[in-house]
Image (cartoon, grey):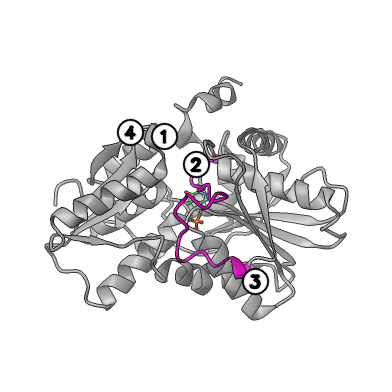
Amino acid sequence: MAGSVAIDESTIFETPLVELVLDLECDATVLGKVEWFNLVGTPHGGGSVKSRIAKGMLDAAEDAGELDPDTVLIEPTSGNTGSEIARLATARGYEVEIVMPDNSAGGKIEAVRDAGATIEFVPGDLGYDAVLDRCEEIIAAAPERYHRLNQYENPANPGTHERTTAPEIYEATDGAVSHFIAGVGTGGTVTGTGRGLHHRDESIAVSGFEPAEPLHAIDGLKYLKSGNHYHPGIYDERVLDEKRYVDTQDAYDRARELRSRYQHRMISCVDSGQHDPTVVRDHLRVDDQFLVGTSSGAGVQVVYDLDAAGALDDGDVVVLMLCDRGDKYADIPLWAAYFDD
Ligand SMILES: Cc1ncc(COP(=O)(O)O)c(C=O)c1O
């Protein structure tokens, strides 16, 4: 189909772990899982944490016989899931439609378009639930045409993390991981990885974090605090040992802090995953490779919050997800100063 480009799916999973040297009260080790190494080296560049579930959900749907060559895949998303479903599904020969807010980051809109998917925009000021509603409306008008993988309700979302992210973290740390931290969009990462880690060691503390404000700018995360908002079915809060809330400004400030630590060579690779160690080291040497997205900055804020609350000890090994890169957010006003530095 038009726009589809062959994709090497074997470059998904087994992402590197890097050490982030932070100013903590205690002597804990903090490791970031660099998710933009998913699909690195494939056309249109590296992916994000969502490359994992795009593959997991597509495989599950195909295995269950739910897709045929004429199926149109439709998904409501603020970007990362859309671009990853678009890249993988168009490469497998499907047509893809993405429903997204019109104020989504320019880099994410481009990524969906580059993959050859079509986009239905919903006014961003209506809030994210309006995007979900619009998607359901489109499906209701032609149910036989569409298949929604539905990252919010699909057990293959947490299931993929339980099967891949959890063992990767456990094995790369030789079982030393003591804390796992992930933000909540669908809740798939924290639910699945948390389950997989607990299955190996019940004592690993799993922290989920959500945006503190409804009108936040932590891309990829969903505000869930008030009961008026749709709660993803696959987000199982029983897996969490604790939940934290992060302000947008703190998330941006911590993303900037990571960039500066990177520039001062305070970030180093501890496990290269499926990648050649020299490739990861070279990546860490090139300028501005540590422009992390805001949800990664929010994760760093949670590490500081846990430390300040006395929840971390000397010798602990904390792993947090670095879900995507920040350069795709260049056109968002809060990032402007970041790019002018
Ligand atoms: C950049 C980013 N961070 C974090 C998340 C949250 O991940 P999950 O949906 O697995 O909760 C997402 C989800 O879209 C994301 O795009």
Is residue 208 found left or right of 125 in the rendered image? Answer: right
Q: Secondary structure at mark 3?
A: helix
Magenta highlight on residue 224? yes
Residue 90 quadrant = bottom left
Q: Secondary structure at mark 1?
A: loop
Q: What's the magenta bit mostly, secondary-structure-wise? A: loop
Residue assigned mark 1:
105
Magenta highlight on residue 253? no
Ligand 1 has an atom within 8 Å of the beta carbon of the residue at disc 1: no
Label pair 2/1, CB-CB below 8 angstroms? yes
Residue 123: mark in rendering: 4
- Residue under the image location 25 percent in, 72 percent down: 62
- Residue under the image location 35 percent in, 67 percent down: 57
Residue 219: mark in rendering: 2
How far separated are the C-alphas under marks 4 and 2?
16 Å
Mark 1 or mark 4, earlier in chain: 1
As displayed, is residue 132 above or below residue 153?
A: above
How far separated are the C-alphas under marks 3 and 2?
27 Å
Residue assigned mark 3:
170
